[in-house]
Image (cartoon, rainbow, N blue to C red):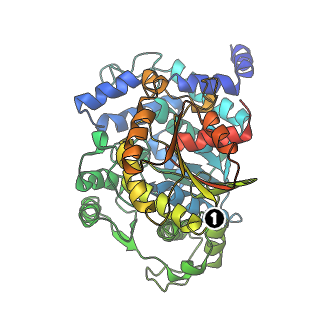
Amino acid sequence: MKLSMALNMASRTYKDAVASLNSLQSNYANIMAIRASGERKNQMNIWEMQEWSRRVGYSVSDYSKLNIIHITGTKGKGSTAAFAQSILQQYGSQIRKVGLYTSPHLKSVRERIRVDGAPISEEKFTKYFFEVWDRLEATRSPEDKFPHMVPGSKPGYFKYLTLLSFHVFMQEGCDSCIYEVGVGGEYDSTNIIEKPTACGVSLLGIDHTFMLGDTITEIAWNKGGIFKTGTKAFSITGQPSDGLRMLQERAEEKKTSLSVVPIFNELKNVKLGIAGDFQIKNASLSVALAHEHLSRLNILQEPLELSEDAKLPQKFIEGLQNTEWSGRCQTVKDGQITWYIDGAHTKESIEAASGWFKSVAVNSASKKILLFNQQTRNAGALIKYLHETLYPELKLSRVIFSTNVTWKSGDYSADLVSMNTSKDQVDKLEVQTALRDVWQGLEPNSDINVTSSIEAAREIIKNEKEPVDVFVTGSLHLVGGLLVVFDGTH
């Protein structure tokens, strides 16, 4: 029996793991049905994650060994997590291994689960993936408590990856981890963490309303759900007043404290590893989170003063300078083309991304091009915010609206397959055509292209006869697909 399982494991590949993972995606019809019903996440999500953990071999209390920083928010939570990871890596002599769990991924799903800054290898992803898969196959849940978790069923895509991340970090011996919330907080699958070392909330905004609510107060209630008794919570300065008020109420409810982190003056003269003026708030939040974490582990003894003039440890400065985070305010030079890449899917994030592009490109003599898609949100509203931010100081001579399909053949990169969108809608270029019409109303004289793939969009840009600055924004699936096209490997 053991030999048979060993042979089976040896025969399964990374491609098999990705295909199995993709089979756990909810299809488009199911997602639309949930949205139409008004059904929102509830406590069952947490109970299910606790039960899945038990079946894989863990008590939720086991995860406390990972010493987790837990981060939520609408804009900037991934950047904050990346900054915090880089800071903790500066303490490699006192921390054994740093784990990072984030979403979504850009090119490879392995990016979501990192150890010491690097995505886990294909070999380890495959090994750990099927260990979790096989343990779920071999175990059962009590029917009276979980009647819907029938034999052979698995968690959905994000829940499975969350479960896998815990397994990876436990097996790899990580003793400091950072978890970025997927959606919201209260009912997010990451919120089975019982004793985080610190909790953080980046900028709040309106997003995922069908799950979290239509107002900033409802959204803040969900985000504040990650707060835990005995764990300090931190938020950035400049939160919407109603949102901050709710976060404070949730901190009181959870019997903890919420501190608003100022922008540290010392960081104003530091070149952060992630570009964009707005990143200084995320960097400041990461400083507070990392300092609290290291204090809880007795690695740092001196308290951090939460004032603008606070003196920061040199290792913190070095960590912030060395942070790398692809697809976020990233610049790629390719001959006479300069790509400015930043995914954005909310009003706040599209304004921040557009403001960054304007600041770096407004004085450039190069032709300006926009490459955009946002398949599943109010894309028309987003490009209006984009236009308002750029104009009149910076005008675009060409605009390209593409799908998130990677290749001209109609194929997606295997790690980027998405069943969460309407194939018919994508095939008919419905979103892209609607975006073209919106942009024509804003700028009637613009050259506008609609393309069925990211590869085709890139070819149009490559055929430009003069230097160009290309602003790539909107969906992170577009950003990730473009980076795959840059690599040129199917």
Quarter the N terminus occupies = top right
- The answer to whether residue 390 is above or below residue 27 is below
Q: Camera-side residue: 199 or 239?
A: 239
Residue at x-position 40% and y-position 17% = 150
Q: Is residue 478 left or right of residue 237?
A: right
Residue 90 quadrant: bottom right
Residue at x-position 36% and y-position 38% = 46
Residue 312 quadrant: bottom right
* Residue 105 visible, this orientation: no
- The answer to whether residue 47 is above or below residue 145 is below
Q: Give the x, y percent position of residue 156.
A: 45, 29
Q: Camera-side residue: 469 or 145?
A: 469
Q: Dot 1: few (<14), some (14–19), or many (≥20) neighbours within 10 Å?
A: few
Tell me the residue that label 1 is attached to: 365
Residue at x-position 44% and y-position 28% = 421
Return the residue found at the far bottom.
309
Q: Give the x, y percent position of residue 134.
A: 58, 22
Q: Camera-side residue: 242 or 334?
A: 334
Instruction: Give, as a three-letter code, the residue at label 1.
Output: Ala
Residue at x-position 66% and y-position 72% = 318
Q: Give the x, y percent position of residue 451.
A: 55, 33
Q: Give the x, y percent position of residue 24.
A: 49, 25
Q: Is residue 486 left or right of residue 400?
A: right
Helix, strand or loop at label 1? It is loop
Q: Camera-side residue: 84 or 397?
A: 397
Q: How many marks?
A: 1
Quarter the C terminus occupies = top right
* Residue 423 visible, this orientation: yes
- The answer to whether residue 347 is above or below residue 456 is below
